[in-house]
Amino acid sequence: MKQLTTTLALFGLATLGLMLTPSAKADEWNEKTIVTFNQPIEIPGRVLPAGTYVFKLLDSQSDRNVVQIFNKDENHVYATILAIPDYRMEPKGKTVITFEERRAGAPEAIRAWFYPGRNYGEEFVYPKLKAVELAKANTEHVLSMPNELATNTQHPAKSATEPQVQAMVKAPVTAIEHSGNEVALAQVHPPAPQESTTTMAKNTTPKELPHTASTLPFIGLLGLLSLGSAFVVGAARRHFA
């Protein structure tokens, strides 16, 4: 009987491993990233104290990206942020967060967040007043949206259908240059070059997992494993009868 119990336990572990495999893909889908800051940092709409945070892409059906920042336990949303895809030629194998330049004594402001291995990252869009302030302290542009949407970033939105998120998604986005001049988004974000099929670019990552390439092989494999376990149980019963 001990041999039978051990065999069934191993079978259970194998099945559990198969059932947990899809969860490994979830982090790549929403680009979940755990980041620890040792000093306060600024994001659109607020300043976060030093600590550990979780960055994720919101499951949005829009053609723009929305980033949510959670506490480390993922039970509180600090901000829901509009972002624009930011292209880089050479993806890194680790998370990269870039910052805007700031005046002395001011917290650093996040410019963009890149998930490991992705050519595309998320460049944060700031309310216009803050974008002008940041741009004047930088040599590069800062993305801008209307000031009246500043409070929308602070709502703990859970769904892309909520009014606060939809208002940001539909907002006109421009860029503020170092001079303070406002320019069209297309001037600072020209179309990215075509990528090879082997490059894991963000714009080729589906927002939804495929419905057609999912369960049939898995069900078939479970069926084979079930037959195998039945054979083992039957043999064990005959052996110990």
Image (cartoon, rainbow, N blue to C red):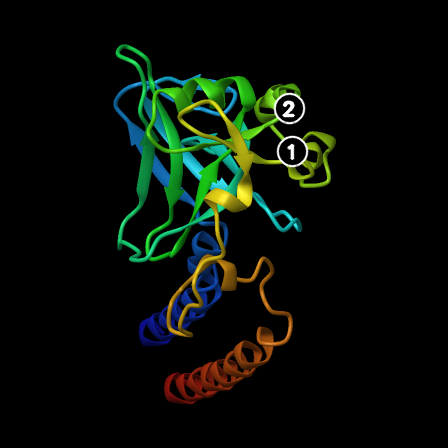
How far, Cα to Cα, is label 2 from label 1? 7 Å
Number of callouts: 2
Q: What is the x, y in percent for residue 15?
A: 45, 70
Tell me, yes or no, if residue 66 can be seen here. no
- The residue that label 2 is drawn on is 149
Circle 2: residue type: Leu
Q: Please name whichever residue, 80 or 20, is drawn nearer the observer in this view of the structure.
A: 80
Image point (32%, 13%), residue name:
106
Q: Secondary structure at mark 2?
A: helix
Q: Is residue 141 above or below residue 185?
A: above
Q: Residues within 10 Å of mark 1 (few under 14, many from 20)?
A: many
Q: Residues within 10 Å of mark 2 (few under 14, many from 20)?
A: some
Q: Which mark is on residue 160?
A: none
Circle 1: residue type: Met
Tell me, yes or no, if residue 35 can be seen here. yes
Image point (36%, 39%), residue name:
34
Q: Do the residues under discs 2 and 1 have CB atoms within 8 angstroms?
A: yes
Q: Is residue 65 above or below residue 164?
A: below
Image point (29%, 57%), residue name:
90
Q: Quadrant of the C terminus?
A: bottom left
Q: What is the x, y in percent for residue 81?
A: 54, 33
Q: Decide which of tag 2 and tag 1 comes sooner along the chain.
A: 2
Q: What is the x, y in percent for residue 47?
A: 43, 17
- The residue that label 1 is drawn on is 168
> Residue 32, located in which quarter of the rendered image?
top left
Left or right of 51 in this view: 183: right
Q: Is residue 104 above or below residue 78?
A: above
Q: Quadrant of the N terminus?
A: bottom left
Q: Please name whichever residue, 20 or 152, is drawn nearer the observer in this view of the structure.
A: 152
Q: Secondary structure at mark 1?
A: helix
> Residue 111, located in which quarter of the rendered image?
top left
Q: What is the x, y in percent for residue 189?
A: 48, 47
